[in-house]
Amino acid sequence: MTATERVTAAYERISTIDRPEAWIHLRPLDDALADAAAVDARVAAGESLPLAGLTAAVKDNIDVAGMPTTAGAASYAYLPDADSTAVARLRAAGAVVLGKTNLDQFATGLVGTRSPYGAVRNAWDPSRISGGSSSGSAVMVALGVADIALGTDTAGSGRVPAALNGIVGVKPTKGLIPTTGVVPACRSLDCVTVFARELGLARMTVELLSGPDGFDTRARDDRPGRLAATPLRIAVPAPHNLEGLADGWAEAFGVVVERLVDAGAEVVAVDITPLLRAAELLYGGAFVAERTAAVGDHITKHADLIGTDLDPTVAAIVQGGADATAVDYFHDLEQLDQLGAEGHALLDGFAALLTPTTTWHPTLAEVAADPVGANSRMGRYTNFANLLDMSSLAVPAGSVDGLPFGVMLTGRAFDDRLLAEIAASVPGVTVDLLVVGAHLSGQPLNHQLVSAGGTLVADVRTAATYRLHALDTQPPKPGLVRVADGGVSVPGEVWRIPAAGFGRFVGALPAPMAIGTVDLDDGTSVTGFLCEPYALDGARDISDLGGWRAYVSAVTGSGA
């Protein structure tokens, strides 16, 4: 696909999905097409552009020349005259930037709801949070609009939203990607991160963006990393370190561990309490004062905007750092040094630490009811990485109750390539998906499941609580909806798809189709296709015909 074709397809995709809140600044189509035409011309002239034909979204605390940078607050906005280093390198490699994405204001949050531009809804379930702070970037990748997106990660902002939207989020070693042109959250901890639906693309992009730029004084040269030993030794949290996970998540994590063991890895449970205690220092101690140093003056100057343009939860967190003293900071630094030494010692002899990426996936309503408490649960396994100068990446690992479940690998500084090697070797992480229409065996869209690596598991029937409609689409496909009464049992198939292939598949899913949990007639549940109710207006109810194949046969007389 040429850059022009890909940009055109991206804007068509934007028009079919209901996520306007994911953008703060979306470029006019003509502007993006002009960039795409320039990329196509460079390729035609013989240039080698590794990201040519790909689209990109950029978190709105990262400068893009000619587009306002708001960091999620209109009162903070300024117009940069140059790209950030990361964006300049992204464009030089051939990617076309579509616009600037929404975020938890000033990159302070892991929920994706702390923004005057609106709470960003999850790509799979709009009643759930997207995760943050890089919310819009993650959702636009998950929904297939952007192939790559840039975010930032101080406490988990590039990993938590990746996990909650079923994509890859790479948080490289601090300083590998310069933060020139990035609004600081905690300047000493901030990392530019990369989202993609595939690990290989995410890692390639990180490599292209890495290296000192002569401006960021904290930028670092890459160093040779460790090689994976044989047998591979992976640390996992001791059982009591996994307490408090959402229902079904400990079991899903156990499946990943079992598959690593089956593949020959040595997996050892380790008490990671020192790392978890270090994580608590990020917001529970004097380190939060670095956020005050970054944007506290702006919030104080515009205190009258708290509750409108300035998010009250963010304002309270940032202003709270003003109470920390230098003595508090040095006490916490000493404690962090001790906990870090203990934590690193625990991981001696291991290639990496494997954890769930986060602990739960709340609804928007749950976060609204307890914005601080809900958020604090999100960063248990992510908060310590930057404090302790560690590399980390999050990858999809299947689904639980129709929502993505993700795991995370964390290692020493400059172990980025080793983590990617391990992540690529995690075997057999799959998603079971119910299909009831055009993706059934022998139907026109079944090839999409096959190309995603899917295999047929079983013929099944839904519980008798659904209705099936024939939508006016090309190619024709059905809309399955749950009803309060008058439902029927609809026949279908369950296909098993590798998690990476499932991410690509969901990313290309057109509206009004959605992914959700479907109950089966044997009392179990499975991830499956559902239809947004608005699309049923005028659609024919075919529930009583006996399924999609029966409907196709009745319409075409083909006996299909």
Image: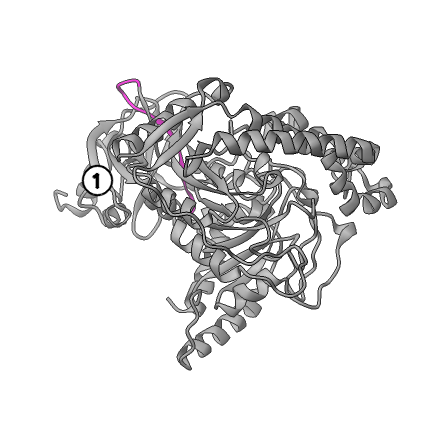
In the image, residue 184 above or below residue 460: below
The three-letter code of the residue at mark 1 reads Thr
Choose between 196 and 175: the one closer to the eye.
175
Choose between 519 and 177: the one closer to the eye.
177
| Residue 381 seen by the camera | no
Task: Tell me the quadrant of the picture where the C terminus can be found.
Answer: top left
In the image, residue 19 above or below residue 247: below
Choose between 494 and 80: the one closer to the eye.
80
Residue at 61% across, 63% down:
85
x%, y% of residue 175? Answer: 59, 53
Dot 1: few (<14), some (14–19), or many (≥20) neighbours within 10 Å? Answer: some
In the picture of the structure, the residue carrying the numbered disc 1 is 455
Residue 87 colored in magenta in the image: no
| Residue 189 seen by the camera | yes
Residue 522 colored in magenta in the image: yes
> In this rendering, would 496 be left or right of 393?
left
Q: Which residues are magenta?
A: 511-523
x%, y% of residue 247? Answer: 45, 20
Q: Identify the residue at the far bottom of this view.
A: 45
> In this rendering, would 261 be left or right of 101?
left
In the image, residue 40 above or below residue 113: below
Q: Identify the residue at the far left of this view.
A: 559
